[in-house]
Image (cartoon, rainbow, N blue to C red):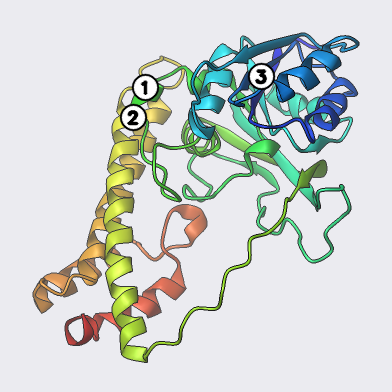
Amino acid sequence: MQTMKISVAMAAYNGEAYIREQLDSIAKQTLLPDELVITDDSPDRLTEDAINAFKVTSPVRIDYYRNETRQGFPENFFKAIGLCKGELIAFADQDDVWMPRKLELMTAQFADPEVMLVTHKVTIVDSQLKVKEDLDDNHWSYVGTFEPLQTDPWYLLFGMSAMVRGALFRVTDLKVRPLDFSRDGLASHDMWAWFMGGALGKIVGLPDKLALYRQHAVSVVGAPKQSSLAARIAYSIKTGRSHYDKMASISHDRAKVLSQVTQPDLAARARAAETFYMVLYQQNADRASLYAPEKTLIERASAGLRLLRKAGYRPQAQGGFGLKALFKDLFLFLLVRRVA
C-alpha cells in the first residue's frame, strides 16, 4: 500500500518533439504518481499543446505552469520542484522514456526512513530510442546502499534517474545554494540532491536499468593544436590552481549551507557533514597552494605535508583526491616555479 505521496517534477523547454513519449511512459507506471508538475520555459505554445493533448486521457494529475519569462534550465527545475507537494519527488527529463516499474522499485527503498535519495542505471539510446552500442552508463558506479558521507561528494548525478525526499529541498534557502563546480552558475537540482542526500542520509543505487536516456545529436569539435610539453605543463598548473581554489570555495559554501540545517531529525548529521566539508575546504586550499608559483618552497611543501597527514589522497569515493593525484602533484611540485 502506498503511504507516501509521489510527485514527478519536469522542466520543459521546446519539448514538443519527444515529450509525449515521456508522458505516456509515466502514465504506464505500475505505481502511478499523485501529481506531475511541469514548468515550461518554451517561447511558444507547442510544448503546452502536446501536454494538453496528453491530459485528455491521462490517469495522472497534471499541474502545468507556463513561465512568463524564461528561467533557464536550473531555475526552471527548481521551480517545478518547489511546486511539488509529494513527500517523494522523482525528476523527469522531457525527452526520456521510463520503464514501467521505475517508480514502484524506487519508492520501495524509502521504507527505510534514513534513505534520502534513490537512483538507478539507464539504457543510453539515440533520438529514435535505438540503443547506442558505443555508449554505456559506466558513469554510474554506485550499486547498493551507502551510509551518509560514504559516496564521492563531487559525483555528477544523472538527475533523470533520481528520486528524493522532498525535505532535501526545504531545509535551507535554495536562493543561496553553492556554486555548480561543472559549469557557471548556482548548483543544479541534481547536484543539490546528491550533495544534500549524501550528507543527510543514505543513498541507494539500484542495478536496474529503469529509463531510456535519450541522447541527441553530438557536436563535432576540431582537434586541438599541438603544443610543447612545457606549455602543456604550464596550462595544467594554471588551471589546476584555479580549479582547486574554486573547489575550496564551494566546499566552504556547502559547509555554510549545512550549518543552517537545524531540524531535530537532521541536525546531528548536518553537523557531521559540515565538518566533512570544512576538511575538504582546507584540502582543496592546500592543493591550490601546490600550484601557486608565488608561494615559497617551504609554504608549498607544508601544504603538501598537510595533505598527506590529513589523508587528502584517500579514494575519491571518500572525498579525497585519489592516489593518481598524489603522483601528479609530486611531479608538478618540482616544475611549478620553473614553467609557471
**Above or below, comparing residue 142 to residue 225 in the picture:** above
Measured in 3D between alpha carbons, the distance from the residue under mark 2 to the one under mark 1, in whole angstroms, is: 7 Å
Residue at which label 1 appears: 261
Q: Residue 115: give x, y in percent of width and height.
A: 62, 29
- Asked whether residue 283 is in view, the answer is no
Q: Residue at x 76, y 62 (%)?
A: 135
**Above or below, comparing residue 254 to residue 266 in the picture:** below
Mark 3 is surrounded, within 10 Å at the Cα level, by few (under 14), some (14 to 19) or many (20 or more) other residues, namely many
Residue type for callout 2: Val
* Comes first in the chain, label 2 or label 3: 3
Q: Secondary structure at mark 3?
A: strand
Q: Quadrant of the C terminus?
A: bottom left
Left or right side of 114 for 18: right
Residue at which label 3 appears: 38
Q: Residue 91: give x, y in percent of width and height.
A: 66, 29
Mark 1 is surrounded, within 10 Å at the Cα level, by few (under 14), some (14 to 19) or many (20 or more) other residues, namely many
Left or right side of 164 for 96: right
Mark closer to the observer (2, 3): 3
Q: Would you identify the image quadrant in which residue 13 lies? A: top right
Q: Quadrant of the N terminus?
A: top right
Asked if the residues shown at circle 2 and circle 1 are in contact, with their CB atoms under 8 angstroms apart, the answer is yes
Asked whether 144 or 195 is in front, the reply is 195
Residue type for callout 3: Ile
Q: Residue at x 60, y 26 (%)?
A: 43
Mark 2 is surrounded, within 10 Å at the Cα level, by few (under 14), some (14 to 19) or many (20 or more) other residues, namely many
Residue type for callout 1: Val
Measured in 3D between alpha carbons, the distance from the residue under mark 2 to the one under mark 3, in whole angstroms, is: 28 Å
Measured in 3D between alpha carbons, the distance from the residue under mark 3 to the one under mark 1, in whole angstroms, is: 28 Å
Residue at which label 2 appears: 257
Left or right side of 88 for 258: left
